[in-house]
Amino acid sequence: MTSEEFVGAFWHKSTYSGNNNACVERGMLCSGRQAVRDTKDRARGVAVFEPASWQVFVAAVRSGELSV
């Protein structure tokens, strides 16, 4: 992953984010990969997913296999 991959990325806040500052953002990267970051602490870094891995991650969150 390079910093160029984040140029032009479209970030939006999760609908699961509440008013208690527990916010995450998802970024759609120009490479087609997906990224997740902590809105209030961006210095912690970014988790980047390949398209197939992103689908597995989303399915696990939706099913309750992973807590958010």
Image (spheres, rainbow, N blue to C red):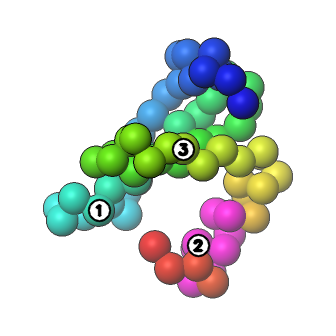
Judge from the rendering whether residue 64 lies leftward or rightward of residue 48; answer left or right. Answer: left
Number of residues whose C-alpha sits closer than 10 Å to that of mark 2, classed few (under 14), some (14–19) or many (20 or more)? few
Query: Tag 3's secondary structure?
Result: strand
Residue type at tag 2 = Val
**Magenta span includes 58:** yes
Residue type at tag 3 = Val
Q: Give the range drawn in magenta.
A: 57-64
Judge from the rendering whether residue 29 lies leftward or rightward of residue 9; answer left or right. Answer: right
**Magenta span includes 42:** no
Q: Residue 46: which numbered mark, if any?
A: 3
Q: Mark 2 points at which residue?
A: 61
Residue type at tag 1 = Ala
Judge from the rendering whether residue 39 lies leftward or rightward of residue 21; answer left or right. Answer: right
Residue at 60 percent of width and 21 percent of height: 3
1 or 2: tag closer to the N-terminus? 1
* Image x and y of residue 5, in percent: 65, 22
Which callout, 3 or 2, points to the residue nearer the camera? Answer: 3
Does 38 sit above or below residue 21? above
- Can I make out residue 26 in this image? no
- Can I make out residue 56 in this image? yes
Query: Tag 1's secondary structure?
Result: loop
